[in-house]
Image (cartoon, rainbow, N blue to C red):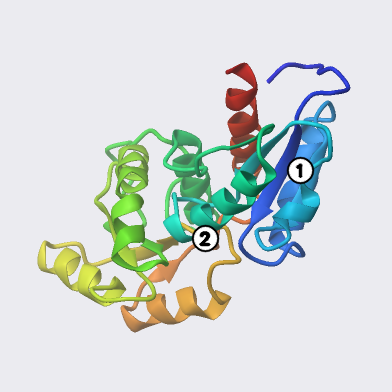
Amino acid sequence: MPTSLPPDAPVLVLATPGDTAGVAEEIASVVRVDNPQIEVRLTSVAGLADSLPSGREAIVVPLLTWDDPVVLAEIGKTVAARGEGVVVTEALGPHPLLAEALHIRLAERGLARADRVRLLNVSSPVDAVILATVGGERAVHAVQATAVLLASRLTLPVVAASLDSEPGVAVAAERLRAAGADRLAVSPCLIGYEAPRDLVERAAASINAGHAEPLGSHSAVAELVARAYGSQLAT
């Protein structure tokens, strides 16, 4: 990301499928503080048309951990109606920074060591992790790469599972325990707007596992937003 930009540089439009209040607003604030050279606008996907600048280019960054085709199609229709001057980036994941943020969220709840070095005389707090998402089978398939990145960091088995469809978290837990992984943790691959908070809690309780908090306004999420903008700016 350049340290300075011309006054007519494209506006970064952060589009959230959820409410612009709460976590989305927090993420936008972090992006602004870390990148004062960028004009950042926060909008819901439904309100995207009104948030696109008139007579100026824009780069739309969807606040998604995976390329949700329904959300991206809605954004695409709005951008197509606008015509030229607006481009849309891909979702924030998969990316090593996303895996880093997931790792830290687990560590904050005592479900993973904060460091990446596995010492032979220090046991892991859990035997395996379930990377939970919403969006059905398509979402589970989309976050598989993120699961691989997280497994690499933790050097533990990590499997993706759905919170809102079958086969879900319970099936993943059954398979992991059948393979000898008794202590499990649920890591929500969610920004925070995608599902009620108690959905993760109930899923974890149903399999007697601990759980991390959603990604929320973690600095890595804000950095991924800025990187998505910067990548489009460079092209």
Whether 204 is drawn above or below 149: the answer is below
Residue drawn at x 37%, y 45% as measured from the top left: 146
Q: Position of residue 158 (x, y in %)?
A: 28, 52
> Quadrant of residue 5 in the image?
top right
Q: Amino acid at mark 2?
A: Arg
Which residue extends farthest left?
178
Which residue appears farthest toward the right when viewing the image? Answer: 7
Q: Classify 134 as above or below 68.
A: below
90 horizontally vs 36: left or right:
left
Residue under pointer 2:
109
* Image quarter hosting the C terminus: top right
- Residue shown at 81% from the left, 31% from the top: 56
Q: Which mark is residue 30?
A: 1
Disc 1: CA contacts within 10 A as few (<14), some (14-19) or many (>=20): some
Three-letter code, disc 1: Val
What residue is drawn where x is 71% and y is 54%?
Answer: 48
Residue 160 or 38: which is nearer the viewer?
38
Secondary element under disc 2, as helix, strand or loop, is loop
Quarter of the N terminus within the rendering: top right
